[in-house]
Amino acid sequence: MTEQARIGLIGLGTMGAALALNIAEKGFAIAVWNRTTAVTHQFKADAGALSDRVIPTESLADLVAAIAKPRTIILMVPAGQAVDDQIAALAPLLDADDLIVDAGNANFHDTNRRNAAGLPVRFLGMGVSGGEEGARHGPSIMGGGARADWDRIADILTAISAKAEDGSACATWMGEAGAGHFVKTVHNGIEYADMQMIAEVYGVMRDGLGMDATAIAATFGRWNEGPLKSYLIEISAAVAAATDPLTGKPMLDVILDAAGQKGTGRWTAIEAQHLSAPVPVIEAAVAARNLSARRAERQAGEAVFGPAPKAVTGLPLDALEHALIAGKILCYAQGFAMIDGAAHDFGWAMPLPDIARVWRAGCIIRSSMLNDMAAALTEDAGRNLILAPAFADRLKVSVPALRQVVAAGALNGLALPALSAGLAWFDMARTARGTANMIQGQRDFFGAHGFDRLDGADRHHGPWGAH
Ligand code: 6PG
């Protein structure tokens, strides 16, 4: 061994191996350890020109000895108990100022708990987005924990992260404790919502307009050159364009219509409820995944009620593009407001403009629109995104199309849960005099809960009488 490693990494699965190579490529010597020693040696053997910077180790003690002090060790192990087990095994071997970084998809409550547990070492929780490709060539990194601990390894994280078009690094400290994993969770909720809205529009094209996969691929491809330019639209075009080697049919026509999930999108919906933060587009997307997985129930439903008419006439593709633009703005407005809510509840920094910036490259939800969102949040981070003039103007243009698409869906039996939820949220959010006065009347009627009055008069109960 010629030098001590600047950093260590545990867990050479797909993501861990890709991240370790990325770190080595950026010039940092890295010590690695995997539960199965053969995997560790194979990793070094496969590292090619980077193998000089890879130090394979066969025990945790060897790993710790291979890293320069104060040590930093990244955990890339499955979220949950495996992280606790790894911390328990590692901590006795470390010094108090050594740093463990959990870079898995942790539930931020676990990260909060680990921070609060008074671990004998320093601890950072780091959300990493971008899949294997991102981990290898530039992920989006959302850090949480003590600022000083983030600063200690910021040079590495900056070097390995994705770079936005303006060259800035997509790696930012989000706040104390679980803040980084919280932001990653909301990222995934938005990821679910973006994907669901694209799937809904795909459904309108396929079932409403009778378009084939090739025409749908071309449409997504065209949209990817406009305001919707994003990784998810780009890959949707590629998915629609692909042909099944087994049957020669479009891939989309052979893939089962039941979505899987590992749960992080669901966490967003759950946390939104705890925070009283309305994120109905994300909630609808989570519910839609759950319903998609209940295929037998859906088949029984179609057997009883018959297929919906579905065919739509007079709906231009432009309207679908604008519906997606509006839906996306509404969904992100909800997501950023939810993060703002968490900043207040948990006392976290949560720099909203930086969060938009960190999502501009490397992550699954990267899109050109995030540039404008970052600009709008820089003007005023406390204002809902839909009220920022640049986005209010876009919504004024695009919401009529969203209305047209949602109406066509409702009339013809095309399920558009996320787009509909976005529109309903928008219509509430732009209505000064709502309908909750009825709810307050009902609450007072059956429970004497009281209400406030518009005229400010000092009478807070109704004349309901006996019923
Ligand atoms: C990312 C993704 C990733 C996530 C997958 C699958 O940012 O790289 O969010 O972390 O695990 O997208 O998630 P589901 O299995 O829940 O769809």
Image (cartoon, helix red, strand yellow):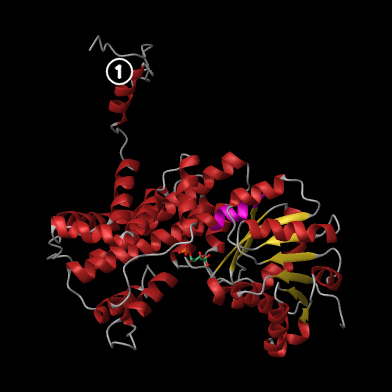
The quadrant of the picture occupied by the C terminus is: top left
Q: Amino acid at mark 1?
A: Phe
Residue 99 in view of the camera: no
Residue drawn at (63%, 48%), measured in percent from left and top? 349
Residue drawn at (53%, 46%), measured in percent from left and top? 340
Q: Nearer the viewer, residue 52 or 257?
A: 257
Place of residue 442 in the rendered image (x, y in percent of width and height, measured from the top left): 29, 23
Residue drawn at (33%, 55%), measured in percent from left and top? 418
Q: Residue 66 falls in which quadrant of the image?
A: bottom right
Q: Which residues are magenta?
A: 175-184
Q: Nearer the viewer, residue 374 or 193?
A: 193
From this view, report whether residue 283 is shown above or below residue 461.
below
Q: Residues within 10 Å of mark 1 (few under 14, many from 20)?
A: some
The quadrant of the picture occupied by the N terminus is: bottom right
**Helix, strand or loop status at disc 1:** helix
From this view, report whether residue 306 is shown above or below residue 156.
above
Q: Is residue 338 magenta?
A: no
Residue drawn at (33%, 85%), measured in percent from left and top? 244
Q: Residue 256 falls in which quadrant of the image?
A: bottom left
Q: Nearer the viewer, residue 426 or 153?
A: 153
Q: Is residue 166 left or right of residue 118?
A: left
Place of residue 182 in the rendered image (x, y in percent of width and height, measured from the top left): 57, 52
Q: Is residue 449 left or right of residue 130?
A: left
Q: Is residue 295 left or right of residue 307?
A: right
**For the image shown, how many numbered marks are present on the structure?**
1
- Residue named by callout 1: 445
Q: Residue 45 falls in which quadrant of the image?
A: bottom right
Place of residue 315 in the rendered image (x, y in percent of width and height, measured from the top left): 17, 65
Main SS of the magenta part reads: helix
Place of residue 87 in the rendered image (x, y in percent of width and height, measured from the top left): 73, 58
